Image: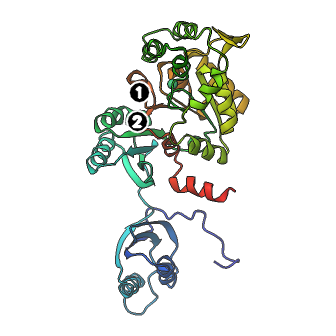
């Protein structure tokens, strides 16, 4: 357009404006996109929309363009010429071309937009069929599908319009449980991109162990403590009572056990990748634990976390007393700490993500903008917004719409 021309009020054609959908399919090679638009440029058409994907070396390129103005005089129509030229260009490159006449822009997308992320290990065709059918049953339309990751799980994202996020969650959660895949539904929009604080539970979430059981092994009361822990995590016991009962069994242990336990802690696979990637993307990351600061402070230091809060084992004269000091971090305490961290980070609660596995994480998971039950006990899995049941913590990145390629690019570009 030359400088003297006045641009139209809107670049999007009205419903009465003839448009052409030009679809190209075939073996990908450099220059196809440039070649198609070069061919179209001879007809002075405008681009309304473009989508292109390459799957296993095959390109699918769709261009929605305004139809060319009819020729003044002469024989045939400009549209007929355009069709013939595009087909002959495509044939010369061994590509298939299809040109469909229509009017106006794409059909407007329905209101209510969500991202449905599916994690499969593997992702079977049966699961993909069931998920797609379940989306359709809510009245939702699948606008786009793309793969977020192939490692350590296959992760695909469906962009869905025309259905409420909550309705999708209700239909997809039982479907996912039955299929043995993980499905997360989050509403689309800027909020998703603005999530800026991730707060994690520690025991059986950030790390594979229950720290109190590591201490108990040194005290020779592992079985006894493990039984109380399991009952508390299933929600059968008051957490604070159970904590006091278990810590009491550690009374008299030498304080040197703290260092030994720190060394025994095993991070969950993907934990470092998750934290490193989130930090590089500018997220703040914290942990809240019903375990002990003697371990969480070391994790905070090692992983470069922004926040950490837990209970503190009392140590007097080089021995554990069998008591904790200060207020106990219990179920309500974890939710309160999430709020505190959010306030300190300057992030609204709706833009926080919480991850946990136990009954004492439930208030925190429900208070967060997105609560993720990670390999959680059934009571937690059923109550959380979304559940991840593969044992890789970095898969949480995919729920935030971060692709494996982005994770790896971040690793390459930061020295
Ligand atoms: Mg836990």
Please give the name of the residue rendered at 31% of the width and 47% of the height, measured from the top-left corner.
132
* SS for callout 1: helix
* Left or right of residue 63, residue 137 in this image: left
Q: Is residue 314 visible?
A: yes
Mark 2–mark 1 CB contact (< 8 Å): yes
CA gap between label 2 and label 1 equals 9 Å
Task: Point out residue 254 in the picture as x, y percentages from the top left corner.
Answer: 65, 15
**Vertical order, 120 against 252 (above or below):** below
Count residues near mark 1 (Cα–Cα under 10 Å), then give few for <14, some for 14-19, many for 20+.
many
* Left or right of residue 357, residue 126 in this image: left
Residue 260 versus residue 135: which sits nearer the camera? 260
**Vertical order, 96 against 263 (above or below):** below
Q: Which residue is mark 2?
A: 389
Residue 112 is marked as none
Residue at far left of view? 126
Mark 2 or 1: in front is 2
Residue 182 versus residue 193: which sits nearer the camera? 182
Task: Point out residue 15 in the picture as x, y percentages from the top left corner.
Answer: 44, 62
Please give the name of the residue rendered at 41% of the width and 83% of the height, measured from the top-left corner.
82
**Vertical order, 347 against 309 (above or below):** below
Q: Which residue is mark 1?
A: 381
Task: Point out residue 409 in the picture as x, y percentages from the top left corner.
Answer: 59, 58
Task: Point out residue 301 in the picture as x, y percentages from the top left corner.
Answer: 70, 34
């Amino acid at each position: 357009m030359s400088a003297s021309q006045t641009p139209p009020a809107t670049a999007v054609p009205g419903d009465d404006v003839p448009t052409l959908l030009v679809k190209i399919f075939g073996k990908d090679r450099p220059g196809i996109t440039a070649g198609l638009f070069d061919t179209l440029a001879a007809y002075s058409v405008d681009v309304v929309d473009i989508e292109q994907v390459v799957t296993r070396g095959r390109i699918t390129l769709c261009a929605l363009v305004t139809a060319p103005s009819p020729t003044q005089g002469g024989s045939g129509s400009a549209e007929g010429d355009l069709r013939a030229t595009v087909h002959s260009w495509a044939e010369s490159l061994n590509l298939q071309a299809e040109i469909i006449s229509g009017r106006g822009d794409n059909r407007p997308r329905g209101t209510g937009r969500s991202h449905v992320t599916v994690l499969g290990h593997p992702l079977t065709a049966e699961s993909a069929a069931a998920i797609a059918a379940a989306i359709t049953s809510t009245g939702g339309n699948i606008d786009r599908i793309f793969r977020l990751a192939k490692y350590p799980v296959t992760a695909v994202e469906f962009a869905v319009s025309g259905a409420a996020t909550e309705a999708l969650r209700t239909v997809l959660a039982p479907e996912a449980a039955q299929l043995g895949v993980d499905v997360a539904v989050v509403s689309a929009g800027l909020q998703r991109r603005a999530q800026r604080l991730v707060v994690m539970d520690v025991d059986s979430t950030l790390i594979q162990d229950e720290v109190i059981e590591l201490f108990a092994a040194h005290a020779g009361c592992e079985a006894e403590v493990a039984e109380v822990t399991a009952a508390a995590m299933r929600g059968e016991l008051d957490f604070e009572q159970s904590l006091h009962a278990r810590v009491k069994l550690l009374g008299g242990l030498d304080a040197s056990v703290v260092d030994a336990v720190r060394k025994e802690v095993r991070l969950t696979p993907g934990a470092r990748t998750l934290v490193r990637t989130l930090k590089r993307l500018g997220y703040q990351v914290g942990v809240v634990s019903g375990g002990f600061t003697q371990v969480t402070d070391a994790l905070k230091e090692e992983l470069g976390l922004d926040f950490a809060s837990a209970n503190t084992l009392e140590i007097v004269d080089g021995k554990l007393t069998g008591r904790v000091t200060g207020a106990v971090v219990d179920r309500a305490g974890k939710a309160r700490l999430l709020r505190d961290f959010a306030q300190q980070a300057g992030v609204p609660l709706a833009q926080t993500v919480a991850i946990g596995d136990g009954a004492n994480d439930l208030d925190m998971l429900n208070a967060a903008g997105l609560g993720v039950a990670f390999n959680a006990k059934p009571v937690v899995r059923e109550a959380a917004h979304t559940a991840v049941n593969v044992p890789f913590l970095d898969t949480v990145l995919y729920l935030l719409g971060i692709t494996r390629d982005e994770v790896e690019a971040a690793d390459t570009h930061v020295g």
